């Protein structure tokens, strides 16, 4: 946040690089959940800076919409903030909604302008009716307007799966990035040579994983990325965790010096650390 504030101050003080004229608009672009880090944006602080320096805020909710917050409305709902404070809200219908396409939300003038000037709106074909129906039905389900509690149950199940999966990986001794509530779980491999090895060894054990390397990540911060779903049962997660544990030992991926101690008598979400010998 200090870095962002410095950038905003510099943009206001120094203006445009060559002419030094003031910028007409300053736009802050953030993601709800960062897809390679698994971290949730510190939205309250970003909104405070946006208001302080009179900037605009663009929020990309590809991974957070339908997955975060008590009612599944994304990162704004997760922090209990006002959607009015976000100028442009963007998201996709491919993840939580199981369809295709995406959306942009904002003030009426902005949406009208995009409809008449954006290439994707002017030249592309519109969504097919079955896809639109899938999106509408998913939205109603998540919001509880379909007369069932299925949407709420799915959001709770996803949160439980996320916390359980992250806790178990930490107990095994892996280094995991991101926020405890983030359903995107990056498991650090670090060495570029281990990217292919991890992917192949997991595939041998009938588990398909997404492995990520340079240039999507820094060259020595290779990782495997797990995206959890409400459809995963505890049995599925345990099967995957057993295989990950085995491959972790085989490839020596358990880098963490702070192993979580699994205590049977501790509350579900608390963690206890012990320092392990090098």
Image (spheres, grey):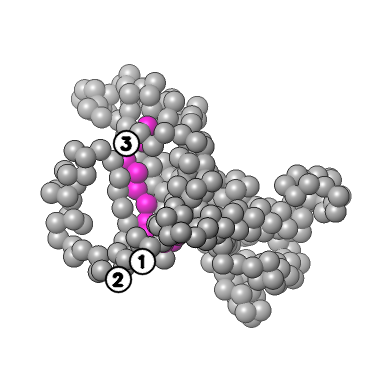
116 vs 154, left or right, is left
The residue pinned by badge 3 equals: 87
**Residue at left 52%, top 45%?**
69
**Residue at left 22%, top 27%?**
24
The residue pinned by badge 2 equals: 130
Tell me where residue 146 sits by quadrant: bottom left
**Circle 1 SS class:** helix
Relative to residue 54, is residue 159 depicted above or below?
below
Pick whichever of labels 3 and 2 is earlier in the sequence.
Answer: 3
Question: Crowding near pointer 3: few (<14 within 10 Å), some, many (20+)?
Answer: some
Where residue 121 appears, as percent x and y from the top left, is 18, 55
Residue 214 showing in the rendered view: no
For the residues labelled 1 and 2, the Cα–Cα distance comes to: 6 Å
Queried whether the magenta region covers residue 94, the answer comes back as: yes
* Range shown magenta: 85-97
Tag 1 near tag 2, CB within 8 Å: yes
The residue pinned by badge 1 equals: 134
77 vs 120, left or right, is right
**Circle 2 SS class:** helix
Residue 87 showing in the rendered view: yes
Queried whether the magenta region covers residue 109, the answer comes back as: no
Where residue 190 appears, as percent x and y from the top left, is 62, 57
Give 123 or 36, whichever is nearer the viewer. Answer: 123
For the residues labelled 1 and 3, the Cα–Cα distance comes to: 27 Å
Tag 1 near tag 3, CB within 8 Å: no
Pick whichever of labels 1 and 3 is earlier in the sequence.
Answer: 3
Where residue 188 appears, as percent x and y from the top left, is 63, 56
User: Residue lying furthest front in this view?
Assistant: 147
Where residue 129 appears, as percent x and y from the top left, is 25, 69
265 vs 74, left or right, is right
Relative to residue 50, is residue 208 depicted above or below?
below
């Amino acid at each position: 946040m200090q870095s962002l504030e410095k950038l905003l101050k510099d943009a206001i003080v120094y203006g445009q690089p060559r002419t030094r004229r003031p910028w007409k608009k300053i736009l802050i672009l953030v993601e709800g959940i960062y897809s390679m880090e698994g971290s949730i944006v510190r939205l309250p602080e970003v909104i405070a800076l946006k208001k302080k320096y009179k900037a605009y805020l663009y929020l990309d909710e590809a991974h957070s919409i339908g997955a975060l917050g008590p009612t599944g409305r994304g990162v704004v709902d997760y922090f209990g903030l006002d959607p009015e404070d976000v100028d442009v809200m963007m998201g996709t219908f491919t993840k939580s909604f199981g369809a295709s396409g995406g959306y942009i939300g904002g003030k009426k003038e902005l949406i009208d302008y995009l409809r008449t000037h954006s290439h994707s709106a002017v030249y592309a074909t519109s969504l097919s009716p079955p896809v639109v129906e899938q999106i509408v039905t998913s939205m109603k389900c998540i919001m509880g307007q379909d007369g069932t509690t299925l949407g709420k149950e799915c959001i709770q199940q996803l949160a439980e799966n996320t916390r359980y999966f992250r806790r178990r990986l930490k107990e095994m001794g892996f280094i995991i990035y991101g926020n405890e509530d983030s359903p995107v779980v990056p498991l650090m491999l670090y060495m570029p040579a281990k990217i292919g090895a991890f992917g192949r060894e997991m595939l041998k054990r009938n588990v398909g994983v997404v492995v990520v390397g340079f240039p999507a990540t820094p060259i020595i911060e290779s990782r495997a990325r797990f995206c959890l779903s409400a459809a995963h049962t505890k049995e599925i997660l345990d099967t995957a965790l057993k295989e990950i544990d085995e491959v972790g030992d085989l490839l020596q991926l358990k880098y963490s010096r702070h192993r979580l101690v699994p205590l049977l008598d501790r509350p579900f979400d608390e963690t206890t650390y012990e320092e392990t010998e090098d």
